Amino acid sequence: MKECKISRKEALSLLGEYNKDPFHLEHALTLEAVMRVMAEELGYEDEKDYWAMTGLLHDIDFERWPDKHLEMAPDILQKAGVGEDMIRSILSHGYGICSDIEPEHEMEKILFAVDELTGLIGATALVRPSRSVSDMGMSSVKKKFKQKSFAAGCSRDTINAGAERLGWSLDQLIEKTLLAMQKTEEAVRQELSKISS
């Protein structure tokens, strides 16, 4: 069983040290929540904290060093006491973009797939009257997915590659991710208001 070497409190403190922008903090908290739900639903209940912590810390160096994303992360994470297996998993989410570490474990494949997709779903929510995923359907996400100019920074190629690595259809990936975000949206918002204040 994979174990977290640092506590969530320590991880949140580390995240806050390198991330100040509410957008980046919300993304980290969203990934944490989605990864926890995925672990529970895919039979990794005993590793859910590990999955969640990997999601929380995956972009630790992005805000401060966007052009050196994942170059600075290993040193930051090692100094904080994060285990080598988690560091490897975090590095694998940038495979083919800013890392040559390939996602192998199912958790790594999910992190790789949902990182960009949660961004796209989040951007889709922001243009809705509710500004929420709670009333969003698959069709809304798929429509925006096809609209290449919308949230152009969210790589459709990476999302497609992520689904393929998992052996899932794009629809399956979108559905599972959207449901996880709907299930956790309110908790993420409450957590964000706590750490942003």
Image (tube, rainbow, N blue to C red):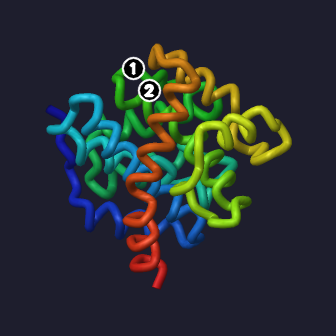
Residue 157 lies in quadrant? top right
Residue at image position (54%, 34%) is 174
Q: Does label 2 or label 1 sit earlier along the sequence?
A: 1
Under tag 1, what secondary structure?
Answer: loop
Left or right: residue 140 versus residue 102 is: right
* Quadrant where the image shows the N terminus: top left
Q: Nearer the viewer, residue 73 or 148?
A: 148
| Type of the residue with mark 2 | Lys
Residue 194 lies in quadrant? bottom left
Q: Looking at the image, is mark 2 or mark 1 nearer the viewer?
A: 2
Under tag 2, what secondary structure?
Answer: helix
Residue at the extreme right = 149
Left or right: residue 101 versus residue 79 is: right
Does residue 174 sit above or below 193 in this rendering? above
Any mark on residue 109, and which?
A: 2
| Type of the residue with mark 1 | Glu
Does residue 77 sit above or below 138 in this rendering? below
Name the residue beneath numbered marker 1: 104
Q: Do the residues labelled 2 and 1 touch (CB within 8 Å)?
A: yes
Q: Nearer the viewer, residue 35 or 125?
A: 125
Does residue 128 sit above or below 47 in this rendering? below
Residue at image position (20%, 49%) is 5
Residue 4 picture location, percent across and down: 21, 47
Q: Residues within 10 Å of mark 1 (few under 14, many from 20)?
A: few
Residue 30 picture location, percent across and down: 46, 55
Q: Nearer the viewer, residue 16 or 139?
A: 139
